[in-house]
Amino acid sequence: MISNYQQTKKDILKIYRDFLPLADRAKNGKETSYDPSLQSLAKQAKNIEQDKFLLMVVGEAKSGKSTFINAYLGEEILPMDVKQCTSSIVEIRYGEKFILKATYADDRTKTLTDEQKIKEFLTRNAAMNDEYRDIPVAVINMEILMHKKDKKILEADIADLMKGIKDENLYHLSDKEYENKVRQYIKAKQPVWRDIVKKIEIEYPFDDKELRNIEIIDTPGVNADGRVGDITDQYIEDANAVMFLKPITGAALEATSFKKFLNSKSADRNKNAMFLLLTRAANETPDNISRIQEEALRQFPVINPKQIIPVDSKAELFYNKVKHLTAEELKGYLSQLRKARQLDGFIKGAWFDADGDREEFLKVLKELSRFNDIDDALNQFAHKAQYILFGDFLGRMDAVMTTITDQLDETRGFYKEKAEDPIELGNRINELKRDLEGITLKINRTVDDVVDKYAGTNGIIDQRADVVIKEYKREIAALDPDGDSSLDELEKISFRKIDIFKQYEEKLQKNIVAECDQALIALSDKSAIKYTTIKPDLTKESFEKIKEDLKNSDEAQESYSYTTGTTFTETHYASRFSRKKYYKLVKKSISSRIDKIKKEAVTDLKRFTGKVTNEYSKELAKNAKIKRDELNEIVQKRQSAEEIQAKIRELSVLLNDFQPMLERVKKMKGGIDKNVG
C-alpha cells in the first residue's frame, strides 16, 4: 500500500487545482459535453479534501439500528426502543455544537440548539408512537402521504399499497385489522402530511477525533423483501460503506432480506463496501454464533468474510456507560440494576466470568460487543477505499482531459483550414453538418436496434426467460407425484428458478448498459439509470400456505368404493385424500406463480431497456447540439487572418499546457492502481 496517504492526497488535489484554470480556458464560458464530468470531479474533490467517509446504516424494522448507532458513536443521541422508525432520513455528523435541523415534507425547515428540546424532538419524530407501531409507517408516508400530498387518495391507491406491504405485517394482525389500521393512519395523517419529517440533520461535538470525518446515515428500515424507498436509494449511491443490520435468531440465520437488498440495491456496487452485522449476539452461545457466522459466509460468498460480524450494541452501550466508574461505583450500580430487575443476562455472565474484577469485567464486555472487530474491519476497508477513490478520481480527470484535448485539437484544425482557404472551410463545415445529421439518424437507428435486440418480440429478454421456464417445467415434469419428497423437490426447484430469474435480470441489465456504452456513447453520468429487481410474491411462508389450503380442498380428494356383507353384499362410495391429486394441484398453483414471475421479469427488463436507451439518446442529442453550435460559431465568425493565427496559437499553447498534466495524472494513477490492486 502507498505509504504516505496525506502526501498522496495533497499531490492529487494540487493536480486538480492546477487543472481547473486550464479547463476554464478550454470552456471559454460555453456549455460543453464534458460539463457533467467536471461537476462529478468537483464533488469527488470536495470529499477527498474533507476526508469525508459516508457510513450508511440499513436494516429491517426492529433490527436495533438506533441502538447500534448510539453504541458506535459512544453517545446516546437517537431514541432507542423496539418501535420502528418513521420515514425520516437521519444524518449525523461532527459539529462544534449540538444542533438539529429538520426538513418537513413540504420542505419547511426547523433548527433547534437546546439539548433538551432536541431530545424531545427526536423522541417525537425519530421513533413511531405506540398507536401505529404495528404498521409500516415509513412506506405509507413515502408512497402515499408524501406522494399524494393534498390530492385525493383513491381506492386503487390503497389496494396497490396493501398489496405492496402484505409481507410487512410484522405483528401478524388479521388482514382486516391490518388494512383498517393502515386506512386509519392515512385518514388521520393526510390532513397534516406537511408535518411529516423527511430528514433530520444532527451535528454533535464528539470527543472522539476519529468520528469527526465520518458521517452516519440512519435510514428507514428495509422491508421483509429487502427493498428500501427511493429516498434511501439515493443515499446508497453516495455511501462509502453500507452496514446492514440483521438480528441473530436463536436457531438459524434467515437472511432473505439482506440477500434481496444486496441484489437489488448493489448490482453495480463494489461488494467490499457491504457489511453484514449480526446483532444481539451477547446472549448467544459461542458455538451458536460460530455456526450462524459460518452460515452467513456460506450464503454470501461475495462479501469479505471480515465484514460479516456478530455484534451486540447493548453490550457496547453498557461498556460506554460504566467504563469511567470506579470499582466501588460499578458494584453499586450493578447492585442497583439487580434490585430493579434491569440487569441483562449478558451483564450477569460477564460479571461472573470476570469474578467481580472491574478491569476484567470491562474487557469481557468489550469482547461481547465485538465493536473492536467493526473498527478493525472498517479501518482496513476505509484505507483501501480511499485509495480506490483516488484512482477513480484520477481516471475521471484523465478521461475529461483527453476529451478536452481532442476537442481543442479538432477546433485548431478547423481554424487552420479557415486560415488556408475560408471558402473551402465553409464547404467542409457544411459537409460536417450533413455528416453530423447523418450520424444523429444513425444513432437513432442504433438505439432502435438495441431496443429491438433486447426488448423486441422474441428478443433476447423473451428468449432467455423462455429457456428458464422450459427448463423449470422439464425438471418438475420429471418428479414422481407419488414420491415422498416430491413436494420438497418442487419447492427447491421453484426457489432455485426464482434466484435464476434474479440473476438473469441483473445480468441482462448490465449487458444492456454495456452495449449502449459500446454502440452509442460512454454515458458521463449513470446515476439516472436505476436497476430493477424482481419482487416475487412466492415466499417460504406463502408456499406452505398453498400446500395447507390445497391439502384440505375438495380437489385433493378422490372417490373410491368398498363392499360390505358376505351373503348380501352392498357397495359403498366415499372419498379420501389423494397424494397424486394434491401434488398436481400444488404443482399447478406454483407453476402459475413462476409464470407470473417470468412475466414480471420480462416486463421489468423491457421497461428498463426503454429507460436506459432514452438516457443515452438524451445525452447524444445534447452532445450533437453542442457540436453543431461549435461548428456554426466557427463558420459565422468573420475574422481577419491575424485573429485566426492568434486563435491557432492560443489553442496550441493550451494543448501544450495540458500535455504535462496528462502525463502527471497517468503516472500517479498507475502507481495507485498498482499498489491498491
Image (tube, grey):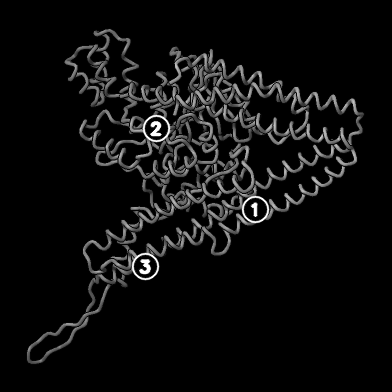
How far apart in space, not on screen, are marks 1 and 3 (Cα)? 40 Å
Residue 292 image offset from top left, x and y in percent: 27, 37
Q: Where is 520 relative to 221, above or below?
A: below
Foreground pick, 607 / 44:
44
Q: In the image, what residue type sits under mark 1?
A: Val
Q: Nearer the viewer, mark 2 or mark 3?
A: 2
Residue farthest to the front? 420
Residue 544 seen anywhere in this rendered image of the structure: no
Instruction: Report whether 339 appears left or right of 86.
Output: left
Q: Which of the 4 quarters of the picture holds residue 378?
A: top left
Q: Where is 555 relative to 535, above or below?
A: below
Q: Residue at x 59, y 40 (%)?
A: 526
Instruction: Report whether 273 appears left or right of 329.
Output: right
Q: Residues within 10 Å of mark 3 (few under 14, many from 20)?
A: few
Q: Where is 35 relative to 172, above or below?
A: above
Q: Which of the 4 quarters of the picture holds residue 491?
A: bottom left
Q: Which residue is mark 3?
A: 588
Tell whether label 3 touches label 2 (CB within 8 Å).
Answer: no
Q: Which residue is mark 1?
A: 447
Q: In the image, what residue type sits under mark 3?
A: Lys
Disc 2 or 3, which lies upstream in sequence? 2
Q: Residues within 10 Å of mark 2 (few under 14, many from 20)?
A: many
Task: Find numbered disc 1 in the image and state the secondary structure of the residue it sits on.
Answer: helix
Q: In the image, what residue type sits under mark 2?
A: Phe
Q: Which residue is mark 2?
A: 275
Residue 406 image offset from top left, x and y in percent: 70, 33
Residue 651 seen anywhere in this rendered image of the structure: yes
Residue 487 image offset from top left, x and y in percent: 28, 62
Instruction: Report whether 45 appears left or right of 219.
Output: right
How far apart in space, not on screen, are marks 2 and 3 (Cα)? 40 Å
Task: Find numbered disc 3 in the image and state the secondary structure of the residue it sits on.
Answer: helix
Foreground pick, 647 / 134:
647
